[in-house]
Amino acid sequence: MPKSRPKSQNLPQKFNPIASSSSSSNKKNTTNKTQNNSARRHGEDDAVQPISGSSESILNALKSPTQTLRESALLSLANTPSMPLESSASAALVALITPEIRQLLLEMILFEDETDMKSLSLGILRNYLQDVYEAEHLLQQDNSASLLESFEWNKLLDHLSKMDCTKNEPLCIEWMRLIRVICCIDLHTIKSVNETSHQKFNALLEKVASIAMNEAHRGTVIGGAGASHIWESIYIFFVWTDQNADACRVMQSNVKLVQQLQSFIKDLMPPQRMSKRMVFEKIVDENAEETMDDEQQQNEKQQKTEDKNYPSYLRIISLGVLYNIHSALDKNQTETLAFISQTFDHIALTLSQLSPAQHLDDLVQFLSKEHLNHTEAEAIKEDWRLPIEGQKLSLELLANMISAVAYDIQSPPVSYHKQIQDESSVSSHFYNFVSQKHIFTHLFAYLSSIMQSYAQRTQDKLDFVTDQSNLIHETLVSALGCMNNLILATSQQQLKPHESTFQSLFSGICAYMKGNLPTETIIKSALLEAATLILWSMLRKMDELDMSNEEATLASSLATFEESAVVRRNSVGILHEIGCRDLTVEQNQTLAEVLLAKLSDKDVMVAVESLNALFEIFGDDMFNATVKKVNMIARLEIFAKQVFAQKYGKQVQSELDNDDKEMVQEAQENLTGFIAYKRQHMK
């Protein structure tokens, strides 16, 4: 089975300010970018509008001594559409920002007098770096790497370190989100970044930790600015340490930094939720005392009463950082299993605390009744976002833990988008862990809650909360990926008691794909990729699952018409599993025609999956009549001679990973053998 494509899920949503809160064009956001609370708000008569024009006109405006002109230029850059994954970077912000404009933006984040304009500059630089990063890692465009190499990293890190943004919440949030993007990019992968820059980056991380610690100690973690600051700051460390052993070693060796993290994590996590000696404490202090004096015990009782005031998403993001460090550096299986078990208790609590769809309904109802200005409404949406972000992260952590437990912690855990394939390597601990923690039950309930609720919603009720609706869809993608990992890591015998529930889930996913999918292309594709992958996994692992004719037709349609190659490939896999079951002669013939048609797919791996399906389904001599009826052998011979090598040769050599290359080579060899066998036995 294929690996689903990484989605760079750790990147924040793009920055998108609005020139005037009264403008009717701003009521509906169709670009999947986060609205900015910090851009200066004006009435209709004095609104600062973006300028239109070329890079040269924007550059001249940025150089102007007139503040209004500079702000108009910034708004123009900030409102430039983000680069779609399907398009070229030449039509996006990357092309508009010249080196001179870049230099001015770097100066403005530190020296511009207006705080709002500093926020605009930070957001623009974040969008620019995200676009370049996505071009390199998702589009694999040739010029993106050189843009990262030529970026002024030393100046950026220097200016970020010198900024004082603690007194302004929106500015601080933008500052942190830009640092998160830098963590995603990973400066160690850029040759032009010198040791001085790495030292500045480490100092910057210490500053981030200090801000979070101060907020925690001020007692502002119960929602609002304090929670946002802490979430964004800890997310930086989560991104930095995610599957990055070098970063984990830096964290471990930086005693001051880790002590700061430990300090406010203890403030966020009341002791009754933790064992007396959590595994992560060993990272900081091997000599941590296990006993508590009377005063500590009294504090524990007091915190137990106040526990409900601590947002669970802050515990989850904190545990995420600790889990990354622990799984990368500590190979002690017993301690890791204990840590995972305890972490899952927090995850289960986070998933059960609220229904995402009901949470969205509450937001819609509140915004429709209250007379709020734009800034107030955006602040409400920001408060709404954090619990859902916490659930999304919980699911990704759970997927990693499933992988870790399933493989006896023999290697660093894979993320949710990398699929477990070898059932024989699953550890003896795995199913006990799954059963004791009722993981199937938690995931079934969560998935059903999202999908059934959305089926009852009409798009007009979701239009003015597009970003929030998209976030819930992204959370559903994480939940589907997590469940897929769980299915693939569980044996067929262990799955059997859950077959009736999986049948309901299977039908629910199919119904969801035919319902209110998001209009945003990238999110829609991600949902379909995750949904078709888990359907394929369920059919592969559970022979008793039923699939209606309507559901099979849906798979055939997705295999034929869907733009995403991953969805087409997954859908062919679904058809493959259907074909291995008892079908009528007419159904077999229809399936053969669909699979043969997919041999002309523009993606080689879709064609390879189609070939493998043809080999397994029609290899038996009992299907020779169908093979003759559709003229399969002659069509395969034409494909082998005229299409395979000529059409896919360059794609195989330059675009595929080693696993897929092996699949292509194996399919070519099997194709020759299949044709020869059928020629011999169908005379």
Image: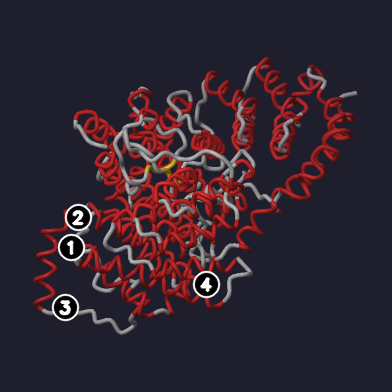
Density class for disc 3 (Cα within 10 Å; few <14, some 14-19, many ≥20) is: few
Tell which residue pokes out farthest to the bottom in this image.
287
Q: In the visual, does 621 lie left or right of 222?
A: right
Q: In which quadrant will I find the C terminus?
A: top right
Numbered tag placed on residue 246 in the rendering: 4
The residues tagged by marks 1 and 2 sit, at their Cα atoms, a distance apart of 8 Å
Q: Nearer the viewer, mark 1 or mark 4?
A: 1
Rendered image coloring scheme: secondary structure
Give yes or no for contact between labels 2 and 4 (Cβ–Cβ under 8 Å).
no
Q: In which quadrant will I find the N terminus?
A: top right
Q: In the visual, does 662 lie left or right of 343?
A: right
Can you see residue 381? yes
Q: Position of residue 4 (x, y in %)?
A: 57, 45
Mark 1: which amino acid? Gly
**Which SS class for mark 3?**
loop
Q: Which of disc 4 and disc 1 is earlier in sequence?
A: 1
Can you see residue 419? no
Q: Position of residue 173 (x, y in %)?
A: 35, 56
Tell which residue pokes out farthest to the front in this image.
65
Give yes or no for contact between labels 2 and 3 (Cβ–Cβ under 8 Å).
no
Give yes or no for contact between labels 1 and 2 (Cβ–Cβ under 8 Å).
yes
Q: Mark 1 highlights which residue?
A: 219
Q: Nearer the viewer, mark 2 or mark 4?
A: 2
The residues tagged by marks 2 and 3 sit, at their Cα atoms, a distance apart of 27 Å
Q: Nearer the viewer, mark 2 or mark 3?
A: 2
**Which SS class for mark 2?**
loop
Q: Is residue 347 above or below residue 608?
A: below
Q: Which of disc 3 and disc 2 is earlier in sequence?
A: 2
Q: Is residue 357 above or below residue 587?
A: below
Q: Nearer the viewer, mark 3 or mark 4?
A: 4
Mark 2: which amino acid? Ile
Q: Quadrant of residue 16?
A: top left
